[in-house]
């Protein structure tokens, strides 16, 4: 909110935050895959029912992480689209305002 009570939209910030969210989203997925690789690398060194169960559970987490990844990805797209819409609206308003006598 501005000091006059109106909303201030800085459409450049939408892209900034969308990019930051995208980066973190990819990092999260990379971390999951890193954990999966590490757990799987223990196979042969750590063999037991519990080890097999843990490996199975870690592998089973991927679909849920992918779902979360998609939700966050869609949110970043929403931010980008919103920023672009604000920018286009502002350009249209500026163009229309310049036509006043």
Image (cartoon, rainbow, N blue to C red):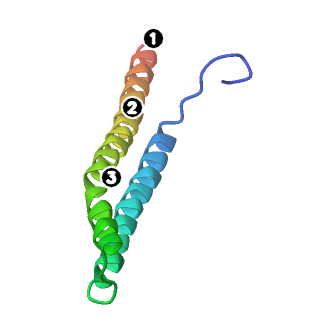
Name the residue that disc number 1 marks.
100
Task: Tell me where residue 50 sits by quadrant.
Answer: bottom left
Which circle marks residue 82 in the picture?
2
* Residue 99 quadrant: top left
Quick one: SS at disc 2?
A: helix
Furthest residue toward bottom: 45
Tag 1 or tag 3, which sits nearer the N-term?
3
Tell me which numbered mark, 3 or 2, is placed earlier along the sequence.
3
Q: Position of residue 79 (x, y in %)?
A: 40, 37
Tell me the SS state at disc 3: helix
Closer to the observer: label 3 or label 2?
3
Residue at mark 3: 65
Measured Cα–Cα span from mark 3 to mark 1: 53 Å
Mark 1 lies on a secondary structure that is loop
Look at 48% across and 49% down and name the residue there: 16
Q: Residue furthest right?
A: 3
From the viewer's perspective, tell me whether residue 6 is left or right of residue 3: left
**Mark 2, other Cα within 10 Å: few <14 / some 14–19 / many ≥20:** some
Q: Up-down: is 30 above or below 84?
A: below
Q: Nearer the viewer, mark 1 or mark 2?
A: 2
Point 30% across, 84% down: residue? 41
Which of 92 and 45 lies nearest the eye of the viewer?
A: 45
Task: Out of 77 and 65, give the one closest to the viewer.
Answer: 65
Closer-to-camera residue (71/75):
71
- The percent coordinates of residue 64 (x first, y second) are 30, 49
When asked about the image quadrant of residue 84, the answer is: top left
The answer to whether the residues at label 3 and label 1 have Cβ atoms under 8 Å apart is no
């Amino acid at each position: 909110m501005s000091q006059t009570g109106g909303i201030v939209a800085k459409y450049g910030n939408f892209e900034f935050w969308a990019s930051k969210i995208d980066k973190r989203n990819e990092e999260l997925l990379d971390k999951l895959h890193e954990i999966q690789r590490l757990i799987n690398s223990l196979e042969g060194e750590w063999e037991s029912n519990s080890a097999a169960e843990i490996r199975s559970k870690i592998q089973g987490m991927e679909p849920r992480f992918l779902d979360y990844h998609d939700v966050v990805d869609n949110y970043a797209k929403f931010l980008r689209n919103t920023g672009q819409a604000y920018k286009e609206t502002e350009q249209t308003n500026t163009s229309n305002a310049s036509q006043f006598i």
